[in-house]
Image (tube, rainbow, N blue to C red):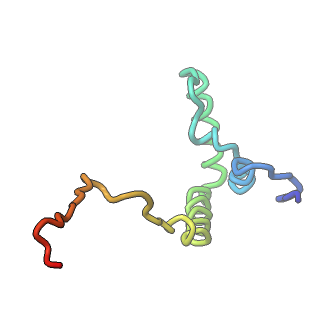
Amino acid sequence: MRTFIGGQEAVSANDFIELALGTPVELWLGVEGETEEARAARLDAARDILAENPNLPDDVSRIAAEVIEAYAPELFNVIPIGRPFGPVRRTTRSRKGAAA
């Protein structure tokens, strides 16, 4: 099954985020190993986008809140597994002297 948003196909979680924001995530978060020149250009572009769309931070917050609300049961469904923390003490009962 294919998912299209505004005529664009979304095939990954990053695609959905990019289509919801209207910008690539890397514009806001940067990329590993980017040069100072690339970082400055990226931040300039981000400032221009925010100047053109001052409601973008509010829209992003609203989208994030909606996603958390929609998936909260799965996000917070924590089930403890394994044994509890700390040493496990084993007790053995002696049968010596036990009443028959």
> 35 above or below 71?
above
Picture quadrant where residue 59 is located: bottom right
Q: Nearer the viewer, residue 99 or 32?
A: 99
Q: Is residue 68 left or right of residue 95?
A: right
Quick one: 27 or 66, which is closer to the camera? 66
Classify the position of the C terminus by image quarter.
bottom left
Establish if 33 lies above or below 43.
Answer: above
Instruction: Please state which of residues 90 and 67 is positioned toward the viewer in this rendering.
Output: 90
Q: How far across and down, in percent of the image, does residue 18 sit? A: 71, 49
* Quadrant assignment, res 20: bottom right
Residue at image location 86% in from the left, 52% down from the top? 8
The residue lying at 47 percent from left, 66 percent from top is 79
Residue 28 locus on image (x, y percent): 59, 42
* Residue 4 sits above or below residue 23 on the image: below
- Extreme-left residue of the structure: 97
Quadrant holding the N terminus: bottom right
Does residue 94 appear left or right of residue 36 in this picture? left
| Residue drawn 47% across the image and 65% down it | 78
Q: Going by the image, does 94 lie left or right of 18?
A: left
**Looking at this rendering, what residue extends furthest in the bottom direction?**
100
Q: Residue 16: x and y, percent?
A: 73, 54
Q: How many marks?
A: 0
Q: Residue at x 19, y 65 (%)?
A: 93
* Furthest residue toward front: 100
Residue 29, percent across and down?
56, 40
